[in-house]
Amino acid sequence: MTWKTTPIGTVIRTSQYGLSLLADPAGGIPIVGMKDIQDGRVRIDPEVRVTLTDEDAEPYLLKDGDILLNRTNSPDLVGKAGIYRGDGKAIFASYLVRLELDQTQVDPDFIIQILASEGGQRRIRQLATRAVSQANLNPTTFKNHFLIPIPALKEQVGIRDVLMAWDTAIETTERLIAAKEAYIGAMTARIYRRSPGWSRYRLGDFLQETKVLHGHGDYVIGSVGKNGIKPRDEVYSKNLTSNHERNLLVKPGWLCFGLASDCMAFGVNSTNQTYSVSPAYRTFQINGADPRFFEGYLRVFNGRLSKRFLITSARQGKAIDFEGLFNTECYFPSREEQQQIASAVLLMREELDHLRQLREALKRQKRGLMQKLLTGEWRVPLPDTESTVKEAAPC
């Protein structure tokens, strides 16, 4: 069975643009902006307020079940949608459009599942028109050309409940990830703090710059960002262009330095494969220290080191003062203790990776469920339905 589809405009009772007002910390009413639309929900920030009389605010007060749609923004944010569920007083900004749905035909939480989904967001962006750096969504175009399935209202609620169960599992996992990240940050900062018996060195005592050209070999092209070295593309064939031949190799255990926006980008190659990176990077062998411990030390103190040694160069823009960086005093324990510390931190990060993998698995499962449920291929059980159905529940 396939559900009948219809333009979303057939179930929208009214649509309304918000207000263009300057924020006023002393204002009497919160105003919702694009940043307050998160994960398909509208969250009110009580600190962002405007001054408006009760009479003028009345037509713009958010009501339970309202959907806000971001009608103008950057191409990747236009069309962002969220549902308002609450009873707090708030109005909404002018670049948002409020959609009031006909709840005799559709359940608002069912519709927001469609609008906030990856497929829904992709379709909305296709309907938007683009300027140089902005994209605009015409509400009339959206109403006429964004199609939605319309199962019976009772079945919409059943589908909504299944998908929201996955949302709850995803949100719970995300909270666990945030808590684990905070814990790891606090623990690593404590672990890498100078302890009695640690010896004094210079950071440069452990580093030997080494330039090995890519040449004509087959290597994974890597990039260096805030989180270290990652593959950029698939393994290249032997028919490499000359600019790849001039790339530098980062062998297992080596350190690579680069730049990412306003911070230092670096990473130790902790894999068993050799990466090829742009010749704009600098590559180093690490001698006399455990590579994982050395990288962890840099990460703990990255913010402090960036402030001191990330400079603005007239010729290069952002550049690292490597001489100053490598002359920085540091304290390291014995090699054995370095390895123990690195192993403990690695274990914590593996636990974090498992949570991230679980989150992605839940998101994939939800995408698959939406495909089955919103086409009618799978049906949800209803209280007055005796037919056999396929049931789904998060792991």
Image (cartoon, rainbow, N blue to C red):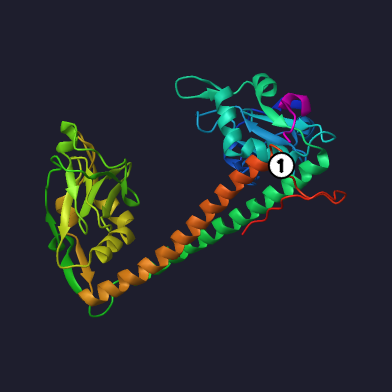
Closest to the observer, 193 or 115: 115
Q: Which residue is mark 1?
A: 84
Assess whether residue 8 is covered by the magenta stretch: yes
| Placement of 155 over or under 177, stated as above or below | above
Q: Position of residue 167 (x, y in %)?
A: 64, 51
Q: Give the tally of numbered discs.
A: 1
Residue extending furthest toward the right: 384
Residue 172 percent coordinates (x, y) = 60, 58
Left or right of 384 in this view: 25: left
Above or below, 288 against 395 in this view is: below
Residue at left 82%, top 36%?
Answer: 103
**Above or below — where is 282 with respect to 131?**
below
- In this rendering, would 33 be left or right of 255? right
In this view of the protein, can residue 333 be seen by the observer?
yes
Of residues 386 and 224, the one drawn nearer to the viewer in this rendering: 386
Q: Secondary structure at mark 1?
A: loop
Classify residue 221 as left or right of residue 359: left
Residue 181 in view? no
Determine if the magenta segment contains residue 64: no
Q: Quadrant of residue 340?
A: bottom left
The answer to whether residue 144 is above or below residue 167 is: above
Front-most of residues 7 and 209 = 7
**Residue sitting at 27 percent across and 66 percent down?**
293
The 10 Å Cα crowd at callout 1, few under 14, some 14 to 19, many 20 or more, is many
Provide the residue span drawn in magenta.
1-13
Farthest bottom residue?
197
Residue drawn at (30%, 62%), measured in percent from left and top?
296
Picture coordinates of residue 234, whole percent (x, y): 31, 41
Q: Position of residue 126 (x, y in %)?
A: 55, 25
Q: Amino acid at mark 1?
A: Tyr
Residue at image x 58%, y 23%? 127
Q: Quadrant of the C terminus?
A: bottom right
